[in-house]
Image (cartoon, grey):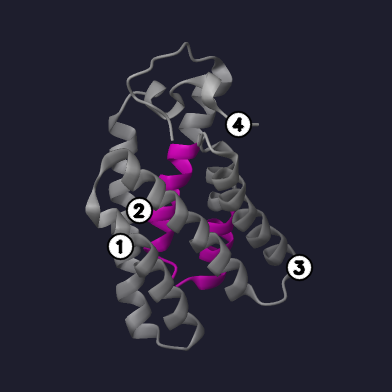
Amino acid sequence: MADPHIQCELDALDKLTVILYRSALTASAGIMSIVAWEQHVATLGLVIAALLATTTVHIYDKRFRWLILGSALFATVWQLVGLWQPLALGAALFAFSALSIKEYFCFQIKALLLTPLALAGFWFCTVFGQDQISIAFSMTGAILLAVAAFSKWRMPLHYDIGDKSRYQI
């Protein structure tokens, strides 16, 4: 996670990756609000948003960065193979759960810690055919992801990058 107190010079690629990350986080909130009704299309959207968010997120520690990216890559591959779409959905939701925990450390908004529970609850209800309950979980997840996205858009772009010398390759 970047340090907001350090302001480095941002090049065009830095600005692009920050904007893409924030856009993917915003899109995930919107997609979560419709996933209970349009699961096939929304799953594809969440997989794409997860891949975009995880490839553009700025996290110093490469282990966490690769864990989050790995789940989005798994979701993408599983979606392309087309064996069992709920597994691709679950992997994408795991990526957004991890990103929401990352954003909790950034903003200290305790409600963001509920995002993984809401997204997991939605996934389990969807897999086990509890459609009415899954709607409540998807809307809760959408609101929590929207809070994270709104918080990101309110801060300057350089807050996402921090100290470039601390990133592990």
Q: Which residue is mark 3?
A: 81
- Rate crowding at label 2 as few (under 14), some (14 to 19) or many (20 or more) other CA atoms within 10 Å: many
Residue drawn at x 44%, y 53% as measured from the top left: 28
The residue type indicated by label 4 comes to Gln
Q: CA distance from mark 2 to mark 4?
A: 27 Å
- Label 1 sits on residue: 114
Give the image location of residue 87, x and y in percent.
61, 72
Majority secondary structure of magenta residues: helix
Dot placed on the residue nearer the N-terminal end, 4 or 1: 1
Dot 3 falls on a residue whose secondary structure is helix
Q: Where does label 2 land, which residue?
A: 145
Evaluate whether residue 149 shows in this view. no
Q: Position of residue 158 (x, y in %)?
A: 40, 21
Q: Secondary structure at mark 2?
A: helix
Q: CA distance from mark 4 to mark 1?
A: 29 Å
Specify the segment rendered in magenta: 21-48
Quarter of the figure with the C terminus: top right
Kindly report which numbered mark, 2 or 1, lies closer to the viewer in this rendering.
1
From this view, report whether residue 14 is shown above or below residue 78.
above
